Amino acid sequence: MSGSDGKTGATRRGFLKGALAAGAGAVSAGGAEAAGGDPAITELQPWMREFGPGVDASPYGVPSEHESHVRRRYVEWLRPDTISAVNFTPIHQLDGIITPNGLCFERHHSGVAQIDPARHRLMINGLVERPLVFTMEDLKRFPRENRIYFLECAANSGMEWRGPQLNGCQFTHGMIHNLMYTGIPLSHVLNEAGLKPGAKWLLAEGADAAAMTRSIPLEKALDDCMLAFAMNGEALRPEQGYPLRLVVPGWEGNMWIKWLRRIEVGDRPWHQREETSKYTDLLGDGRTRRFTFEMDAKSVITSPSPQAPITHGPGPTVITGIAWSGRGTIARVDVTLDGGINWQPARLSGPSFDKSMHRFYFEFDWDGRPMLLQSRAIDSTGYVQPTKDALRAVRGVSSGYHNNGIQTWAIDSDGRAENVEIT
Amino acid sequence: MSRLHDVAWLFSCIFLLTAAAPAQEAGPLGLGRPATPDELAAWDIDVRPDGKGLPEGRGDVLTGEELYTELCAACHGDFGEGSGRLPALAGGEGTLTDEFPVKTVGSFWPYLSTVWDYVHRTMPYGNSQSLSDDEVYALTAYILYLNDLVDEDFELSRENLPAIRLPNEGGFIMDDRAETELPAFSAEPCMENCKDRVEITARAGALDVTPGAEEQ
């Protein structure tokens, strides 16, 4: 089956319809009510009789064909073409805190640069004692580090500023991923070139046809920025900047320059296109915030959600979701079932790393009545994720970026979820 | 054993001395190599608002109009009005507080150097860095003209570009969330009986713009 989108869609549609129909009332325990028992048990399944493929049938392994509906997705009306475009991580189908490499959302401005690593160079120039050029082999001779960070696009949830638009957390919150990066501290390379007095800002530049650039304060660069060449233990994927990407922990994704070819050191910012015309936040009074680098604390319930309805009917139910903060760790996540009248702390599970995604769960006994689900993140600085209306009161509705407001899913008595806003 | 160790140590000292010979040229680990002047010239293409990075050159509005018609108008419109979801370059003055602001070079961009830099590094779309420096000056001059910021006999050059001010330069402020938001959003949140009642005010389903919505 794998492959054909149409076929996958049909299969999935059928599954969901059947599941929803069975959902109300009859809690199925796998068809055991049938006279002779569950055919999954009483009938010999093909995989119980026959050999499966041998080792090496798939030298680079791929997911089960039954998972072929798990994929990044694109919103056609959002961008003029797929070259300067974005697709979205299927966060409603993932669990834990690590995003699989092939499912990390993509945002390119001139497509995926196809780079031969043997012909890739990193140049350091500007206010340095020694302008230097490094090969990939050179860079791997510096002491390496492994660190886990989320990357969130500043435009994540940006389509929702004026009201609910997209029915699915993949689309409303899927411009995020969380990976273990292997690389070298940026400070090593800067020390190798030798910073001159007056150095205060860096310009990072990509090797793609957009020659993407961003200005970054030197203080941040020396604090925790990395030059990464691996994600989750393997080489960066081409769409994530192979062979070299800048990692700017906790700061907006656009600054994490992919296909990194050059770092210039200077005494002031460059005011490039991506930090003036784009990635600045127009406020309701006509003024515009610049250099809004840090990502505010945020959370979202990933299941249930519009693409992941409750299919099992009333009874024991698991709510799960993700939370993150560009200013530290997540101290607590609260969940409400009634649209914010009463809140209860959720349960965090999995490692809690600085500027990394956190996973939360909330288990309860669903009575089958409609619900208004929300989650609310509180980070290690005491910052509490605000409502969308609280954000709008400060910023208006035209900023486009940095929408970290609380998300509401309305769940109906059949378990279906819809993206809504509430009083 | 200890003798062997001594010998090894001696050899390593000799090696270190040899490797460290051009010491003032190298960094702490001696990794990488010096960038050559030609390499720096090829890659160091960024331009700042104060004019740092601008190359020698010049171009006028009429030359820019010819280039624009040939290379840019298909995406950005004959008069910089944009087309479809491709960005407008001109117009939109006074719309920044409107419900749907139009953000163009004339209405929004703070610095002209950004136009020069961006056109030079990545335009025309799909044929990056194909324009000569003079052509970039001419196109930048024409974009100013489309925004009614210069006359049709205007010529832009390395010398006069840094002095040109765009209307919205003063509209930008530094990130002030630390003062305007963080204190307000850091109060201990309510947990019980936080409001009397709740009503749904808007639904995404009403729009029906979600891809694959039929699958749900």
Image (spheres, grey):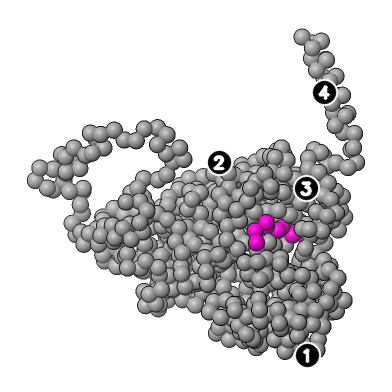
- Name which residue lies at 33% across and 61% down: A6
Separation (CA) of disc 2 from disc 3: 26 Å
Which of marks 4 and 1 precedes in the sequence? 4
At numbered mark 4, what does the secondary structure look like: helix, strand or loop? helix
**Residue A327: image x %, image y %?**
62, 57
Q: Which residue is mark 2?
A: A233
The local crowd at label 3, few if under 14, some if 14 to 19, many if 20 or more residues have their Cα within 10 Å, is: many
Q: Which residue is mark 4?
A: B12
**Residue A369: image x %, image y %?**
27, 65
Q: Main secondary structure of the magenta part?
A: strand
Can the viewer see residue A201 in this picture? yes
| Bounds of the magenta segment | A200-209
The local crowd at label 2, few if under 14, some if 14 to 19, many if 20 or more residues have their Cα within 10 Å, is: few
User: Is label 1 or label 4 in front?
Assistant: 1
**Residue A408: image x %, image y %?**
42, 68
In the drawing, what numbered circle is on residue B151? 1
> In the figure, residue B79 lies in which quadrant?
bottom right
Separation (CA) of disc 3 from disc 4: 27 Å
Specify whether disc 1 shares its chain with disc 4. yes
**What's the residue type where badge 3 is placed?**
Val
- Label 2: chain letter: A
User: Is label 2 or label 3 in front?
Assistant: 3
**What's the residue type where badge 4 is placed?**
Ser
> In the figure, residue B167 lies in which quadrant?
bottom right
User: Is label 2 or label 1 in front?
Assistant: 1
The local crowd at label 4, few if under 14, some if 14 to 19, many if 20 or more residues have their Cα within 10 Å, is: few
Separation (CA) of disc 2 from disc 1: 58 Å
- Label 4: chain letter: B
In contact (CB < 8 Å): disc 2 and disc 3: no
At numbered mark 1, what does the secondary structure look like: helix, strand or loop? loop
At numbered mark 2, what does the secondary structure look like: helix, strand or loop? loop
Residue A138 covered by magenta stretch: no
